[in-house]
Image (spheres, rainbow, N blue to C red):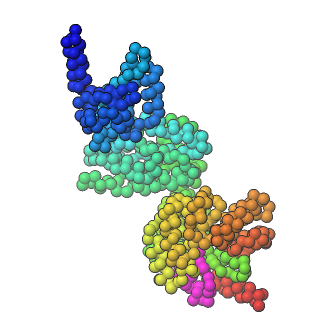
Amino acid sequence: MSDVTDSQLLQKARAFEYANEALFITDAANRIIAVNRAFTHMTGYAPHDVIGQNPRVLASGQTSPDVYYDMWLALEKNDFWQGEVWDRRRDGSTYPKHLTISVVRNAAHEVENYIASFSDITERKQVADRMFHLAHHDALTGLLNRTALEVQLQNALVYAQREKHQVGVLLIDLDNFKQVNDTLGHHVGDHLLVQVGRRLKDCVRANDPVARLGGDEFIVVLQDIESAMSVGAIASKIQRSLADAYQVDEYTLYATPSIGVSLYPIDGSDPDVLIKNADSAMYHAKAQGRNNFKFFAASMNAAAHERLKLENALRSALEGINCDQDSQFELYFQPQIHLSSGKITGLEALARWSHPELGPIPPTRFIQIAEETGLIQPLGDWVFWEACRRLKEFKEAGVTDMRVAVNLSTQQLRHDNLPVVVRGALACYDLLPEELELEITESTAMQNPAATIAILEQLKDMGIVLAVDDFGTGYSSLSYLKHLPIHRLKLDRTFVKDIDTSREDAAICSATIVLAHSLGLDLVAEGVETAAQRDYLQNLGCDLFQGFLYSRPLPADQLVPFILEWNARIEGTQA
């Protein structure tokens, strides 16, 4: 009887040792007491590495704690659990495995052992991932397919409904693509479609879905958009990008797009309707001559056309600056009055644009377009250099002890060479650092606080005066604000406007002035238009005033006599 028992035990031991699946056994305290060869082969751990260890020594840290919680709950309740976890081999590599655990209890129903078996499912998951990718992506371009696009669009609509946002749907069809296929073959056409997909991805944000519906039709979903005009800006960007030449083998190809645009919620509230309406708008774009974009709503088309017209005009005007043509831009300057002296001690440089056909374009229009299209960089560079040139002229005309403030765009602030450019401008026009003030908006400062502080520190070390413009309109963190190496805060005009009638605006102005002074900063109030506003701000201790009460922005040729007369009058009254 004993020989039979020993034989059975030997068979079981061999079955354990030579099983294809990795096996290990733990005691009641969950300490490993035995492992088989497959365990060592799969994990890299020899028996002496893990005997006496808790199985958590295998854990990779990539499995959710909830999985382990559910596992122990099932073992306690059912004496069995199976599922998927991620573990780490001895060499540090991680892998997914399918794990099965059974509980062995004695006659008293007490836990004696846990028996675990597992297998590496890396290949199975890779196959599943490939199948999932193929089921949800276009095989040629790698973009989403229609099924996946509709799911993501539905998710975007749910989020937009909850957050009261808008969503834009752009349906893009290539003009005359059939001709490429018919004359050069599908091989060339396929390569062209792949390049189109890449350009579309480059035109939008990483989280904006891009899909190929089939043939030469693509669709883009713009999530969380600010306005219909911002959708128009992206459509214009896509139009320009896709219309550029493509190189496929030895062929130089052109494939202009016709783009239809629909908007949630005004053009529909579900994916099918929005795609259908974008498709309708796309055919309207084709009917209107191709290589353009059209909104589903006719009213949007007029606004988009006007915006595109302004964008093209702005590009042309900025190219004229670079080519030394007669500039359509001019700098105006608005004086800043110092409270203690009453004198004009500073100027803010403001860009003005007068188009030969469209006439004067308000800054609120062209600055927004410049920011959306990236044209703010060349425009901002021109303003900076022109302001420095004009300041030198003012000094030569007898205006001394004057500082000129220039707004910096986000793009300018991102350039690491900004301090070098500023230093070059000072040397070029023989200016002192303290004669130049650089302003950044509150929202710009908060986009990348660490990088912003690093650039501003360099400028401050040069002696440049630094200011935060439009303070109170952004979402700045005071913990960052106190670290910004700035000298001034500029209180936004929206708070000054009703300071003498609105308790809330008065409280904001008062708190901002106290905050500025507690941080050792000057406070400049913008938009001062009435004596009542001036008196109120003066009582609060505001340091400088800027607004129509003192002067509207003036062209450079009117500025010098205005300043000389103003300061002479102030000196006369103080004599």
Tell me how many marks there are. Answer: 0
Which of the image's four quarters has the C terminus? Answer: bottom right
Q: Is residue 78 above or below residue 311?
A: above
Rendering coords of residue 538 (x, y %) = 76, 72
Is residue 440 visible in this depiction of the protein? yes
**Residue 403 among magenta residues:** yes
Q: Is residue 531 above or below residue 157?
A: below
Give the extent of the magenta segment: 388-406
In the displayed structure image, the side of residue 16 where residue 479 appears, left or right:
right
Query: Along the line of sight, which residue is nearer the eye, 307 or 78?
Result: 78
Query: Along the line of sight, which residue is nearer the eye, 126 or 120?
Result: 120
The residue that appears at 28% across and 43% down in the rendered structure is: 91
The residue that appears at 31% across and 29% down in the rendered structure is: 33
Based on the displayed image, in which of its 4 quarters is residue 67 positioned? top left
Rendering coords of residue 155 (x, y %) = 51, 38
Q: Is residue 454 above or below residue 291?
A: below
Rendering coords of residue 166 (x, y %) = 57, 45
Rendering coords of residue 472 (x, y %) = 65, 61
Is residue 125 visible in this depiction of the protein? no
Query: Along the line of sight, which residue is nearer the eye, 105 or 116?
Result: 105
In the displayed structure image, the side of residue 508 where residue 298 appears, left or right:
left
The residue that appears at 24% across and 34% down in the rendered structure is: 41
